[in-house]
Amino acid sequence: HSTEPWRDFDRSQVYSADLDSALHYLLRVELATHNTLEGEELQIFKDFVTLVAKLYPGGGSVVKLMETLSDWLLSLPLQRIPYQAVLDLVDNKMRISGVFLGAELRWVGCQGSRAGLRGYPCSLWTLFHVLTVQHDAMPTALDNTALEGDAAAVLHVMRRYIRTFFGCEQCGRHFEAAAAASLETVQSREQQIIWLWNQHNTVNLRLAGSLSDDPLFPKAPWPSPSLCASCHEEKNGVHVWNQENVLLFLRRHFGASNLSPKYSL
Ligand code: FAD
């Protein structure tokens, strides 16, 4: 990143360039470490693609790509798919139909102050937060898919994706432990939004001051009082979250109307 110019951005916004870059990295880099997809892995990948195709906000070229990928995966009678076939579809079919997923990674809200910091993991968190909020905003979006009727569909797909594909294995183990401990308590789409926010703050707390901490973006409880004053309260001298206001804030922050197209292709 160090050779790229710094992109000014607003911390109170979410950037579609980050979400597009997350999918680009996921499809071309993360998935590339698997030569073939079959069995459980293929099912997880299909579910992830369905989730994004149905819930990704905006109706832009990335949604079209994910829809095409989803239709293709669902129509295939194959039990195993070579990764190269996925890549060919992403590269070629998309170019022919004019659907184009930017060939570059452009981190905006997920820029790091030097190479190796932030970027993909930041954008993956952001993507899943956006998906939890969209799932709540569009309750029928997953109807007629394998994920219909599951109030925690986003978290279930995320859990299996992270466990199986996420390049950081230690992260996968931590996330799996957290999911095993409390994911089944999530019974509604609102709880799904809050569970992911809370889990992300648990990770922030654990990582504060560690090597992966970008000095320009120190890990801290989020949202800060400057992003959301009403999210914070004090009871008997102790800091507590106002969860109702946190939920309102998350819906707005990760909602479709707060998605900035700045720096997107
Ligand atoms: P990130 O934590 O990536 O956050 C990205 C953006 O999300 C922030 O800039 C902020 O705008 C917003 N945000 C911050 N907190 C919240 C919140 N609570 N709710 C909603 N939005 C928020 N790294 C490890 O070293 N060990 C691990 O065990 C580990 N586990 C991970 C598990 C998962 C599922 C993922 C996706 C990543 C994990 N990582 C782990 C990576 C780590 O969490 C960070 O993503 C990485 O260090 C980059 O940090 P960042 O400063 O960009 O902020």
Image (tube, rainbow, N blue to C red):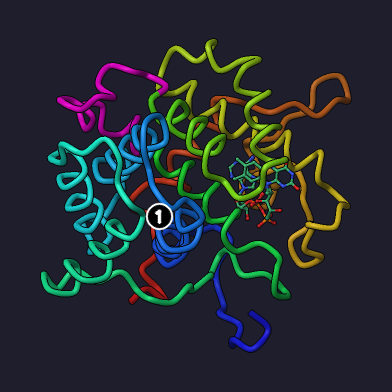
List x then y, in percent, for residue 48: 36, 39
Query: From the viewer's perspective, is 178 left or right of 237?
Result: left
Query: Residue at position x 40%, y 73% from top?
Result: 262
In reply to whether residue 153 is colored magenta, the answer given is no
| Mark 1: amino acid | Asn
Query: From the viewer's perspective, is 169 left or right of 107?
Result: right
- Height in image: 39 above or below 95? above
Query: Residue at position x 61%, y 70% from top?
Result: 111
Q: Main secondary structure of the magenta part?
A: loop
Query: Residue at position x 25%, y 52% from top?
Result: 66
Which one is nearer the viewer's eye here, 219 or 74? 74
List x then y, in percent, for residue 138: 25, 33
Which one is nearer the viewer's eye here, 90 or 262? 90
List x then y, in percent, for residue 233: 73, 30
The secondary element bearing badge 1 is classed as: helix
In the rendered structure, which segment of residues is drawn in magenta? Answer: 134-152
Query: Residue at position x 29%, y 46% from top?
Result: 81
- Height in image: 45 above or below 85? above
- Height in image: 168 above or below 234? below
In reply to whether residue 146 is colored magenta, the answer given is yes
Bin the neighbour count of mark 1 within 10 Å (Cα to Cα): few under 14, some 14-19, many 20 and up. Answer: some
Query: From the viewer's perspective, is 213 left or right of 145?
Result: right
Q: Which residue is mark 1?
A: 258
Q: Quadrant of the N terminus?
A: bottom right
List x then y, in percent, for residue 240: 75, 26
Residue 260's quadrant in the figure? bottom left
Residue 49's quadrant in the figure? top left
Q: Quadrant of the C terminus?
A: bottom left
Query: From the viewer's perspective, is 38 left or right of 179?
Result: left
